[in-house]
Amino acid sequence: MADRVIAVTGGVASGKSAACQAFADLGVHVADADLAARVVVEPGQPALAEVVAAFGPEVLQPDGRLDRATMRQRVFADPVARKRLEGLLHPRIRERLKVECAQAPGPYVVVAIPLLAEGGGRAAYPWLDRVLVVDVPEAVQTARLRARDGIEAGLAQRMIAAQASRAQRLALADDVIVNDGSPADLRAAVGRLHARYLSAQRPTATRA
């Protein structure tokens, strides 16, 4: 069992996944909330039936799987729908992540939680020891999101606005990586934090 649990969070297209991959490349076990979110809505899972009951059969693909594109468009256009979906899924996602982290090897485990601020913060995840925020200016975030998903500017801006603000995320942070540089810069910042996390002493707040 890992001695400490480090949450990694940040806004959409901030570089959370790249940061987590850098930790994984250093041999750190990474538990992923996005992966957990996919598993809990697999066909046959109770959460999928609840989503269909709440939003209708049109959110399903012909093969019975959740139509993520349709669901995304719907919840980002309707804050009430988004909260309803989160209420169905987040408790199951949290429990799955807690079990995985409890079983992880190594001195520490990283858990990627994109919606940490939106999902209740530390109060919802009392088993977290530390929070790392991957931060990025909103203009950079918008450009990356449009390039990554091939979406128009309006949807990108609505997706960003639907999430917690930068200030809300940073209020949770013990450590911050400002990811406005190159991939090599990000990997170097992760490497510096990795060295601190491996230290026998609990690190103080840092900005990598």
Image (cartoon, grey):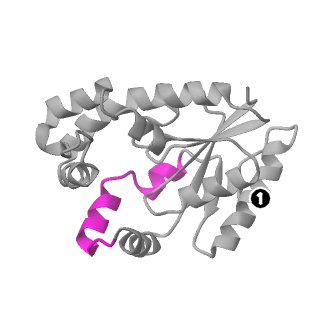
Question: Residue tagged by mark 1?
Answer: 191
Front residue (pair 167, 83): 83
The N terminus lies in which quarter of the figure?
Answer: top right
Q: Specify whether 195 is left or right of 123.
A: right
Residue type at numbered disc 1: Gly
Rendering coords of residue 51 (x, y %):
22, 33
Q: Residue at x 27, y 41 (%)?
A: 65
Query: Quadrant location of residue 204?
Result: top right
Residue 60 included in the magenta stretch of the image: no
Q: Is residue 24 above or below residue 187?
A: above
Whether 56 is drawn above or below 76: the answer is above
| Percent x, y of residue 156 | 31, 67
Q: In this view, which residue lies farthest toward the front?
A: 63
- Look at the image and say whether residue 153 sits in the magenta stretch: yes
Which residue is found at the position 61% from the left and 32% from the top? 128
From the image, give the main secondary structure of the stretch colored magenta: helix
Q: Secondary structure at mark 1?
A: helix
Give the number of marks. Answer: 1
